[in-house]
Image (tube, helix red, strand yellow):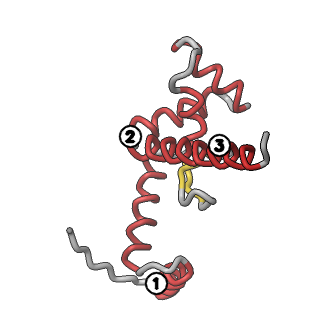
């Protein structure tokens, strides 16, 4: 594991980093690594930001949905490949340019987005199984 030593010339930045790590219940190095990674990703993909949510930290398009939402709407399904971009834009009510931004991010971070989509599918399956058990218990 590479080690990097950072000296902060601005004490308030260091204090904010420590406070942020404390709020997230993680170490300062772990918090700094996440923020640096996200900052580098946002530099490479200027229309993508990161937000916390019920499913954890995830990439989101500025002024639009999560990247995983867009990719889930584009990949697979019965829509012909040449119509997927426009269909996803229509369904999500976003310009095709945002669909393109999501596709570029997905090309660079495929495993991350595939993992988010797999986790969502698993949660949906669990919720449906629970609903079916509840229906059975009610005799319906």
Asked if the residue under mark 2 is in contact with the one under mark 3, i.e. CB atoms within 8 Å, the reply is: no
Seen in the picture, residue 1 relative to 62 is either above or below; the reply is below
Quarter occupied by residue 47? top right
Pick the residue in front: 43 or 53: 53
- Horizontally, residue 97 falls left or right of residue 106, namely right
Category of crowding for the residue at label 3, using alpha-carbon neighbours closer than 10 angstroms: few (below 14), some (14–19), many (at least 20): few
Local packing at callout 1 (Cα closer than 10 Å; few below 14, some 14-19, many 20+) is: some
* Farthest residue, direction front: 139
Left/right of residue 117 with respect to residue 8 in the rendered view: right
Camera-side residue of 54 and 37: 54
Place of residue 46 in the rendered image (x, y in percent of width and height, measured from the top left):
52, 46
Identity of the residue drawn at 39% across and 73% down: 30
State the SS at label 3. Answer: helix
Residue 67 occupies quadrant: top right
Q: CA distance from mark 3 to mark 2?
A: 32 Å
Residue assigned mark 3: 128
Identified at 56% across, 21% down, the residue is: 77
Q: Which mark is residue 108?
A: 2
* N-term mark: 3 or 2: 2
Q: Are marks 2 and 1 in contact (CB under 8 Å)?
A: no
Q: Is residue 15 above or below residue 73?
A: below
Element type at mark 1: helix
Q: Position of residue 31 (x, y in %)?
A: 44, 73
Query: From the viewer's perspective, is the residue at label 3 or at label 2 nearer?
Result: 3
CA separation, marks 2 and 1? 31 Å
* Residue holding disc 1: 14
CA gap between label 3 and label 1 equals: 46 Å
Return the x and y of residue 116 as percentages of the image width and height.
50, 47
Give the percent coordinates (x, y) of residue 130. Answer: 65, 49
Sequence order check: which comes first, mark 2 or mark 1?
1
Local SS, label 2 = helix
- Which mark is in front, 3 or 1? 3
């Amino acid at each position: 594991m590479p080690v990097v030593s950072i000296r902060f010339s601005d004490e308030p930045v260091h204090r904010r980093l420590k406070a942020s790590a404390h709020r997230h219940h993680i170490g300062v190095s772990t918090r700094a690594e996440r923020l640096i990674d996200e900052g580098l990703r946002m530099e490479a993909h200027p229309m993508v930001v990161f937000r916390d949510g019920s499913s954890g930290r995830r990439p989101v398009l500025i002024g639009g949905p999560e990247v995983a939402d867009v990719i889930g709407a584009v990949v697979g399904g019965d829509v012909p490949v040449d119509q997927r971009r426009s269909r996803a834009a229509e369904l999500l009510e976003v310009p095709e340019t945002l669909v393109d931004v999501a596709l570029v991010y997905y090309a660079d971070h495929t495993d991350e987005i595939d993992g988010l989509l797999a986790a969502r599918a698993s949660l949906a399956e669990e919720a449906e199984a629970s609903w079916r058990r509840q229906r059975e218990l009610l005799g319906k």
